[in-house]
Amino acid sequence: MTWYTSPLVFLFLIFRSYNGSNEFLKIQLSGFAQGTTWQVTYYAADSAVKQIQVDSILTRLDSSLSIYKPFSLISRFNTSKKGLIIDDYLTAVVHKSIEVWQQSDGLFDITVQPLVQAWGFSAKPVKKYPDSARVRSLLACVGTDKIKLKGNRLVKTKPCITVDVDGIAQGYSVDVVADFLERRGINDYIVEIGGEIRVKGRKQPGNTKMKIGIEAPGNYAFEAPVIQKIITVNEGAVTTSGNYRKFHESNGKKFSHTIDPRTGYPTQNDLVSVTVFAKDAITADAYDNVLMTMGLQKALDFTEQRQDIAAYFIYKTASGNIADTASSRFYRLFDAK
């Protein structure tokens, strides 16, 4: 069994520094949290938000949502038999997760952790993949219908139920930081955590719109990523999920890190990556996982039926070449002036 890490499909911001006016300052903050890097850029008359404030927010989020911290709130829920009282952070994430689980026909499921671990996509490596009997037994401990939010208490119907919000927590963290900026009177900003982005307003003092570049891999693993598309965003969030950065290979067969919680097996379809645009990052982050699981045609149909998301798809053709397409609402971002 070999573990491969292939090039990342990720987003990066395109912005130019400026000279001149003292009316606006360009403030840039950056750091490391949630196992990745973060960056905040905002334009204001003074430094209304400082590094220590963003670090403090991200530390509190980790203490609530990180499964890698044994004393976090979510870890304590996972080791509990019936559940416990949770904070506002975990409440918001679970509430949104239940909503997306319902609207995606179960494709987004935060109780999928036992299967993620069994297929070797957690911190602990595995010596062999689960057989069908093991998958069936693990599925008995999977299902968002087995958890309930009762006020500020999260309860489970079985002691074996565990929750992993990695597929949505980073987007939510972006929103928490962005909302903090807005409460401080900042209306021109970019917040990015691990490639998940939310923007609002314009670059100052030139009053130019924000542009986001979407990178894609070359046709071969050794090729450097290239800019696939550039979009213009007035306000909203952009996130990406990709299968070619995280996969396992055994006996010449690749296993995607995206697990279908209904079958218990890694997904196998034509999608390489999905980029989602939504009003907030928690929505975009959740649905990029949903669309990756669906495959191209179902994902396109699903996206076109909704008004709250737009999506850009990179996929492999039947001949093995890399191609791309997008939903109609996402195409408008390419043409935005």
Image: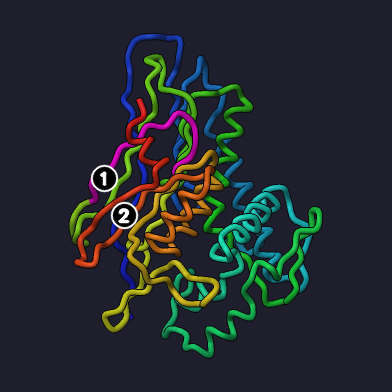
Q: Nearer the viewer, residue 294 or 108?
A: 294
Query: In the orientation shown, which residue stands out farthest toward the bottom?
Result: 133
Q: Position of residue 62 (x, y in %)?
A: 59, 52
Q: Position of residue 299 (x, y in %)?
A: 43, 57
Residue name at image x 24 percent, y 50 percent: 225
Whether residue 31 appears in this view of the structure is: no
Color theme of the render: rainbow
Residue 59 magenta-highlighted: no
Q: Position of residue 150 (x, y in %)?
A: 80, 58
Question: Is residue 183 shown above or below 216?
Answer: above
The residue at which mark 2 appears reads as 314
The residue at which mark 1 appears reads as 228
Whether residue 255 appears in this view of the structure is: yes
- Main SS of the magenta part reads strand
User: Magenta stretch?
Assistant: 225-238
Q: Amino acid at mark 1?
A: Gln
Looking at the image, do the residues carrying marks 2 and 1 touch, with CB atoms under 8 Å apart? yes
Q: Position of residue 199 (x, y in %)?
A: 47, 33
Mark 1 surroundings within 10 Å by alpha-carbon count, few (fewer than 14), some (14 through 19), many (20 or more): few
> Could you give the CA–CA distance between mark 2 and mark 1, rounded to whole angstroms?
9 Å
Position of the C terminus, as image quadrant, is top left
Q: Nearer the viewer, residue 284 or 303?
A: 303
Q: Quadrant of residue 308?
A: top right
Element at label 2: strand
The answer to whether 55 appears left or right of 228 in the picture is right
